[in-house]
Image: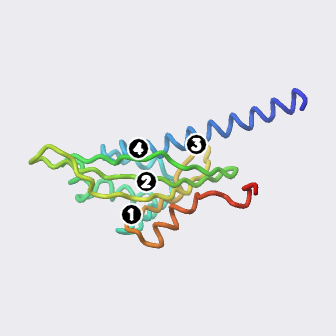
């Protein structure tokens, strides 16, 4: 391998590392953005026509996502004391598209005991696209961990790629 080929390979590897870090940051930014009720910060994670498909309903586009953030149910969680805790993402990148599988937990403060309870454990599948402003969520599918086939399929979507496995 000559110097030019080595440099090209290094640049390719560096770009992949930079993409993985940017995607990890994107997933981890969701918790603080939603827990502060910052519509701008939440919308900055999504494409303009992004979709948030949660088992409680499907939100399409910036206005519906913003309405969820500012709505009474979510604002009630914020004012009681909530924390969306994101897990380490499993990332697959294919050019200007990526997919991510992760868990999240929604913790809610119990003011009477000053403790926290896990209100919800969720499996997330994030479909991302590279935009001029960086990686953005085209669609996030979030399902309560309930043992269903759908949840297991979301988790398995990033399982071992057996086609590249050596025997």
Residue at mark 3 to residue at mark 1: CA–CA distance: 30 Å
Q: Mark 4 highlights which residue?
A: 41
Numbered label attached to residue 103: 2
Numbered label attached to residue 134: 3
Q: Is residue 72 left or right of residue 47?
A: left
Q: Residues within 10 Å of mark 3 (few under 14, many from 20)?
A: few
Which label's residue is closer to the chain start, 4 or 3? Answer: 4
* Contact check, label 2 and label 1, Cβ < 8 Å: yes
Residue at 47% x, 62% y is 141
Question: Compared to 141, does 114 lie above or below?
Answer: above
Work out which quarter of the rendered image holds the C terminus and state it. bottom right
Q: Secondary structure at mark 2?
A: strand
Location of residue 23 in the rendering, given as x and y in whole percent from the top left corner: 55, 44
Furthest residue toward front = 167
Which label's residue is closer to the chain start, 4 or 2? Answer: 4
Q: Nearer the viewer, mark 3 or mark 1?
A: 1
């Amino acid at each position: 391998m000559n110097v030019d080929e080595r440099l090209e390979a290094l640049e390719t590897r560096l770009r992949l590392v930079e993409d993985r870090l940017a995607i990890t940051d994107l997933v981890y930014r969701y918790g603080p953005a939603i827990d502060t009720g910052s519509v701008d910060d939440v919308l900055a994670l999504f494409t303009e026509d992004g979709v948030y498909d949660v088992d409680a309903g499907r939100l399409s586009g910036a206005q519906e996502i913003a309405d969820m953030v500012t709505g009474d149910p979510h604002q009630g969680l914020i004012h009681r004391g909530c924390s969306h805790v994101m897990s380490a993402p499993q990332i697959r990148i294919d050019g200007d598209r990526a997919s991510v599988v992760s868990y999240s937990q929604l913790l809610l403060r119990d003011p009477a005991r000053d403790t926290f309870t896990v209100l919800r454990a969720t499996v997330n599948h994030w479909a991302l696209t590279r935009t001029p402003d960086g990686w953005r969520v085209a669609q996030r599918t979030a399902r309560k961990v309930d043992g269903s086939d759908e949840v297991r399929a979301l988790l398995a979507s990033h399982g071992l790629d057996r086609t590249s496995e050596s025997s």
